[in-house]
Amino acid sequence: MASIISSSTNYSVYALPLYYLLGILPHGVAIIIASGGNPGKWDNRNPRAAGLKANLTKRLGPAKFARYERAESAHYNTLESFPLLATAVILANLAHLPTEQLNTFVAGNFILRSVYLVAYISTSSQLPTVLRTLIWYIQIGWILRITWQAAAFFA
């Protein structure tokens, strides 16, 4: 069985909805944290209400609330990077970059982002955040590199 990376099938466009779903996952983690492990207790009528964080701070305590905030931040960060990734994938396909390169790119980005999310949500001390930031720079740098390679096709 051939690997995904060396396949002649271009999986890069399929990676976009998967990456978006990966970005939603931390929000689900945040809801589980905020609801005490019972998502059915999460009040979804106004999830961005002004008083929500104040109420959660009181109810969860500092450590759980900090984890809730990290999960939400990981969610927002992933959704913020999604347009950049989508642009890179679209331009790379328009530029007819090699399928193997595109598959390696999207698989690598998915892995890097997954490790980044785990590191973001689970890290509560300062030193390990350096690794998380390094992962972010590698991923964003790779996206910019692919975009630059695609841009050469249009020049």
Image (cartoon, rainbow, N blue to C red):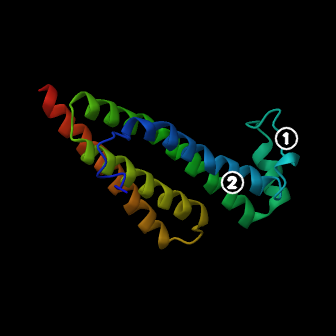
Viewer-closest of 71 and 52 = 71
Viewer-closest of 106 and 65 = 106
Identify which amino acid the numbered label 1 is placed on: Asp
- The residue that mark 1 highlights is 43
Per the rendering, the mark at residue 29 is 2
Q: Is 10 placed above or below 60 here?
A: above
Residue visible at 80% across and 41% down? 51
Residue visible at 26% across and 42% down? 99
Viewer-closest of 6 and 114 = 6
Q: Quadrant of the N terminus?
A: bottom left
Q: Is 116 placed above or below 25 here?
A: below
Identify which amino acid the numbered label 2 is placed on: Val
Q: Residue 12: give x, y in percent of width and height.
A: 37, 39
Q: Relative to 66, is 134 on the left or the right? A: left
Q: How would you rate the neighbour count of disc 2 (Cα within 10 Å): few for under 14, some for 14-19, many for 20 or more?
A: many
Q: Residue 49: give x, y in percent of width and height.
A: 77, 36
